[in-house]
Amino acid sequence: MSEQSYRAGHVAVIGRPNVGKSTLINGLVGTKVSITSDRPQTTRHRMLGIASFDKGQLVLVDTPGIHGAQNKAMSRVLNRAARGALEGVDAAMLVVEAGRWDAEDQMALDALKEAKVPVVLVVNKIDRLREKGDLLPYLAQVSEGREFAAVHPLSALKRQGLEALVDTLLPLLPEQAALYDEDDVTDRSMRFLAAEFVREQLMRQLGAELPYASAVEIEKFEEDGQMFRIGAVIWVERESQKAIVIGKGGARLRNIGTKAREQMEKLFGRKIFLETWVRVRQGWSNDEAALRALGYSE
Ligand code: GDP
Ligand code: MG
């Protein structure tokens, strides 16, 4: 009987920035709820991805990776969110990149030990391994002397190996009814997701040019018949940064808006009218009160 019972619970997703935590969550949920890019610190907020299956429900806690100082107030807020993610979870996944294990990965594992929950090691990005024969020795090496409930090599991006991971995770959760509606994919509001999709495009389209101190605020979110009218403000700290975001003749800002709108239409299933502005506010990223006002708090 118990083998057929339904299980549900929270699973924290921990790892250094850029290992693919958000991509993994999107793969498990089956749709994009957490933004991704090749820039570290793309994820700035703790958020939940909800993945429902016949046998149970995984409530995945996405986290900004645990990392060192670059901007003090921002780092404090991000690390607090990452550690806070471990409170009250039933299990955790430590995500690492195939072929790599460095000091930051170890730091993440050490943070997990305090949580005293089963840890599943996810060895991500195996599609990037040039020598497939390198995988087994790597798995043996990282498992040695470390107690993982299981080790799963996979590719989050190509969605390979995800079913097996789900089969490992569900039995680690308590037998209980679903914690969220099975149609829900995240705990976050559409307003929050709209801001995130704009920020994702900023990350992706500006690359190294992106000012570290940038944030997105949704000023307007209105329903208009079958469509949503959304107004987004991109905050930067200097006029020169504003010019970079806007681009030549406004081309970059237009492109950011177009791509963000497409993502919103996909997730919300509605037609979207999106307006974007860039505004300058000096010093906000060093001010915890301003960060809170922009939603950077647990
Ligand atoms: P996070 O910072 O840990 O949340 O990492 P993201 O999910 O934002 O991913 C960081 C980068 O790695 C993005 O460019 C992803 O497309 C890429 N990535 C994630 N998973 C995989 C994977 O399985 N294979 C490959 N080749 N790239 C991946
Ligand atoms: Mg992320």
Image: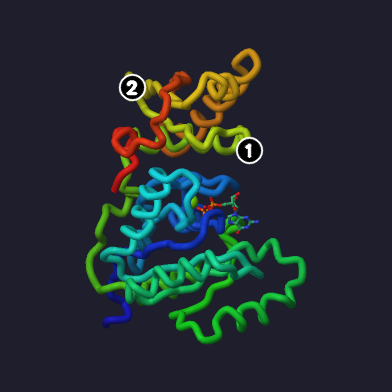
Which residue sits furthest bottom?
145
Q: Secondary structure at mark 1?
A: helix
Quarter-of-image position of residue 1: bottom left
**Which residue is label 1 attached to?**
208
Does the rendering let one see residue 167? no
Q: Is the CB of mark 2 within 8 Å of ligand 2? A: no
Does the rendering let one see residue 199? yes
Rendered location of residue 230, percent (x, y): 39, 23
**Which residue is label 2 attached to?**
220
Mark 2 and mark 1 residues within 8 Å of each other at the beta carbon: no
Rendered location of residue 12, percent (x, y): 38, 63
Rendered location of residue 243, percent (x, y): 58, 19
Mark 2 is on which residue type?
Answer: Lys
Q: Which mark lies nearer to you, 2 or 1?
A: 1
Between discs 2 and 1, the one toward the N terminus:
1
Who is closer to the viewer here, 70 or 121? 70
Mark 1 is on which residue type?
Answer: Ala
Residue 39 as seen in the image, left or right of residue 120: right
Ligand 1, by image quadrant, is: bottom right
Q: Secondary structure at mark 2?
A: strand
Who's the residue at 48% across and 55% down the image? Answer: 68
Who's the residue at 60% across and 64% down the image? Answer: 97
